[in-house]
Image (cartoon, rainbow, N blue to C red):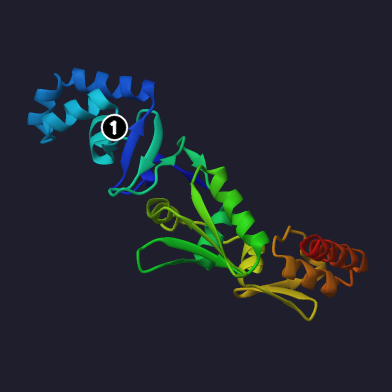
């Protein structure tokens, strides 16, 4: 799905590209300048002068009031607090795979920080790749075999608010089951032979190979794991 300007929450603060700044302040001048705009729309003139001189983040309400549904070019967004900046070029394609993994495996800790938790490094790596694809910064932690990926509260607020269709293969990766020659996740199941999507979970990939009786794939996976063990022990 496409994340557009109008999808951003009201608490958003926005930073503009150089062209975007020119378009915005040209519109301000068309309104008669900062002072007249301040009187007409109840925006602080001192804040507007500050935004103009420092090229700082501005409330999205200010952008929307001036530009409507035709916003200037945006270079970055963030929430109200001191959280990480999300450098983004709107509109941007958001993979339904990412949104599915967010819904299935991300929890919010006591500090409000979103945390993706898994016991497979391959899944953590895939989640990081999907976040990097849309410019979301993240932090990775290895907690004695439990892997955590943390990212900004603001970007999570945006991602978790979007409507999307769950991607079946991502659900299988995150919480599915492969047994009795069937691939199962949520309320859906299909024969293992008919499942043709890529899995990133090593354990589910192995289970799928077993369900299919794919001896070549089983041997390949066992050889890869053996190589990892040899590298660990030197």
Front-lying residue, 201 or 98? 201
What residue would you read off at disc 1? Answer: 56
Q: Position of residue 92 (x, y in %)?
A: 50, 40
Q: State the residue lying farthest toward the right.
A: 216
Q: Residue at x 18, y 29 (%)?
A: 48
Classify 10 Å Cα crowding around label 1: few (below 14), some (14-19), many (20 and above). Answer: few
Q: Position of residue 152 (x, y in %)?
A: 42, 53
Answer above or below: position of 30 versus 44.
Answer: above
**Quadrant of res 39:** top left
Whether residue 70 is visible to the viewer of this picture, yes or no, is no
Answer above or below: position of 171 versus 73.
Answer: below
- Looking at the image, residue 25 sits to the left or right of residue 223; the answer is left
Front-lying residue, 20 or 109? 109
Q: Residue at x 80, y 77 (%)?
A: 181
**Quadrant of res 209:** bottom right
Q: Residue at x 84, y 74 (%)?
A: 210
- Looking at the image, residue 203 sits to the left or right of residue 58; the answer is right
Quadrant that contains the C terminus: bottom right
Front-lying residue, 46 or 224? 224
Q: State the residue lying farthest toward the bottom.
A: 180
Answer above or below: position of 167 versus 53.
Answer: below
Q: Position of residue 84 (x, y in %)?
A: 39, 46
Whether residue 119 is visible to the viewer of this picture, yes or no, is yes
Which element type, helix, strand or loop, lies under badge 1?
A: loop
Front-lying residue, 19 or 232? 232
Q: Residue at x 26, y 18 (%)?
A: 26
**Quadrant of res 217:** bottom right
């Amino acid at each position: 799905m496409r994340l557009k300007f109008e999808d951003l929450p009201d608490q958003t603060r926005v930073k503009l590209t150089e062209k975007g700044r020119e378009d915005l302040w040209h519109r301000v001048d068309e309104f008669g300048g900062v002072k007249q705009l301040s009187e007409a729309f109840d925006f602080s003139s001192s804040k507007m002068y500050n935004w103009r001189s420092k090229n700082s983040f501005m409330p999205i309400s200010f952008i929307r009031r001036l530009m409507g549904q035709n916003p200037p070019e945006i270079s970055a967004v963030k929430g109200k607090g001191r959280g990480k900046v999300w450098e983004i070029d709107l509109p941007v394609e958001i993979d339904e795979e990412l949104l599915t993994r967010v819904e299935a495996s991300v929890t919010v800790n006591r500090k409000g920080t979103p945390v993706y938790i898994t016991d497979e490094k391959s899944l953590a790596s895939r989640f990081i790749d999907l976040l990097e694809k849309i410019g979301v910064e993240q932090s990775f932690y290895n907690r004695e075999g439990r892997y955590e990926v943390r990212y900004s509260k603001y970007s999570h607020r945006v991602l978790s608010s979007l409507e999307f269709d769950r991607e079946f293969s991502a659900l299988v990766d995150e919480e599915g089951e492969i047994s009795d020659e069937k691939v199962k996740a949520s309320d859906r199941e299909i024969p293992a032979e008919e499942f043709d999507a890529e899995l990133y979970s090593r354990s589910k990939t192995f289970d799928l190979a077993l369900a299919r009786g794919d001896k070549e794939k089983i041997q390949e996976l066992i050889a890869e794991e053996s190589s990892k063990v040899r590298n660990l022990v030197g």
